[in-house]
Image (tube, coloured by chain):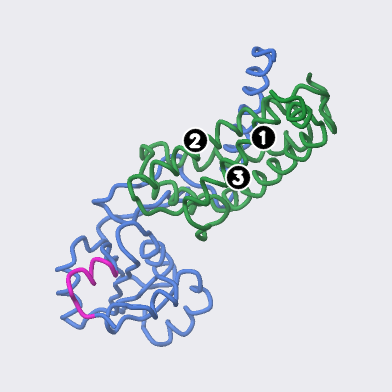
């Protein structure tokens, strides 16, 4: 085996791979940022889509604050997880609005809740970012008062707060 | 090496079969990762092994290394080098899976799709089989069939 030749060919193949990878990531609408947002303390770990702008001020960063909001009865908790996950267990009284079915369900949701409704989105916990994405989608649909409960269902359940 | 075994090892039909199997598998495996790099990045994060600043870069580049090397094996363009790259990847996968199995870390393979793909031990076994096929392609000494560029 001529080692030199194989190494050259390998660099050639890897070079083509890297160039096409960055080119496709740049063009593709599904492309991601070169560096993600994985800080656990911030919640909503995500690879970040390109051009994603997010303000951490919208986050509810601890479970007790979320519980206070819940107890005040002023907010609607909205579950961003799939319907199956929702049916297996969710925050008591929460509405299901799975991210994957957002387009189908947002019409009915809007009829039920006016744009000034205080909404708290959540997903399974700090390692998911569906609640963040749902917040963005709701904001795009005119909801101006949306917060994200980053500890999500797992954090809520762990505290023994009401679920159903 | 036993002569029959050596003949088997240097059988051109087996070499092209293995090349196509590995090539097709990696092209298939790259598809969903290219379509949804965001999900793949999250799966990589879930392995809890990579530095955070590298996760997205791996999620962007790795699928294309799989795709280009897979195509290269099937088309017979630099098959030995492509086999070397893919064997390196397989070794890395085996290592990563084994580390996570040993430390009992629950994770999602993310090998073929965002859905769970069987038990981790089965994944390691599968990768070992691919690696053995890859070694045959890498070390093959005869004339390779169906190559666009005849390298050796």
Residue B69: which disc? 1
Report the chain holding disc 2: B
Label number found at residue B25:
none
Magenta span of residues: A153-162
Compared with residue A52, is residue B98 higher up or lower down, i.e. above or below? above
- N-terminal of the two: label 1 or label 2? 1
The kind of secondary structure element at disc 2 is helix
Image colour for chain A is blue
Percent position of residue B47, x then y: 40, 47
Classify residue B79 as left or right of residue B117.
Answer: right
The kind of secondary structure element at disc 1 is helix
Quarter placement of the N terminus of chain B: top right
Q: For marks 3 and 1, give the CA distance.
A: 22 Å
**Compared to B11, does A78 lie above or below?**
below
In front of the other: label 3 or label 1? 1
Q: Is B110 part of what is drawn in magenta?
A: no
Most foreground residue, A88 or A110: A88
Q: Residue at x 70, y 26 (%)?
A: B80
Q: Is residue B30 above or below residue A91?
A: above
Q: Secondary structure at mark 3?
A: helix
Chain label for disc 1: B
Q: Residues within 10 Å of mark 2 (few under 14, many from 20)?
A: few
> Which numbered dot is residue A27?
3
Q: What is chain B's hue in the picture?
A: green
Residue A66 versus residue B103 in the image, above or below: below
């Amino acid at each position: 085996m001529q080692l030199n030749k194989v190494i050259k060919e390998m660099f050639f193949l890897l070079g083509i791979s890297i160039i096409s990878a960055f080119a496709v990531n740049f063009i593709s609408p599904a492309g991601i940022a070169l560096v993600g947002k994985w800080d656990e303390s911030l919640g909503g770990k995500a690879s970040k889509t390109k051009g994603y702008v997010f303000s951490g001020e919208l986050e509810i960063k601890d479970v007790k604050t979320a519980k206070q909001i819940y107890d005040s009865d002023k907010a609607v908790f909205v579950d961003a997880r799939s319907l199956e996950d929702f049916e297996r267990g969710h925050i008591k009284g929460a509405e299901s609005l799975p991210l994957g079915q957002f387009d189908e369900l947002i019409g009915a949701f809007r009829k039920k809740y006016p744009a000034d409704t205080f909404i708290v989105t959540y997903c399974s916990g700090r390692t998911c970012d569906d609640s963040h994405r749902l917040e963005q989608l709701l904001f795009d649909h005119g909801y101006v008062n949306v917060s994200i409960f980053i500890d999500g269902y797992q954090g809520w359940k762990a505290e023994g707060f009401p679920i159903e | 090496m036993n002569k029959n075994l050596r003949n088997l090892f240097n059988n051109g039909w087996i070499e092209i079969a293995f090349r196509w199997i590995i090539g097709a598998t990696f092209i298939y495996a790259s598809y969903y990762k290219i379509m949804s790099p965001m999900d793949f990045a999250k799966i990589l994060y879930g392995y809890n092994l990579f530095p955070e600043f590298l996760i997205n870069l791996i999620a962007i580049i790795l699928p294309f290394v799989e795709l280009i090397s897979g195509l290269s094996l099937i088309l017979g363009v630099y098959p030995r080098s492509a086999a070397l790259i893919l064997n390196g990847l397989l070794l890395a996968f085996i290592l990563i899976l084994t580390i996570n199995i040993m430390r009992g870390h629950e994770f999602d393979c993310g090998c073929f799709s965002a859905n769970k793909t069987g038990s981790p031990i089965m994944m390691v076994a599968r990768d070992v089989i691919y690696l053995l096929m890859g070694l045959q392609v890498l070390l093959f000494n005869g004339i390779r069939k169906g190559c666009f560029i005849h390298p050796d």
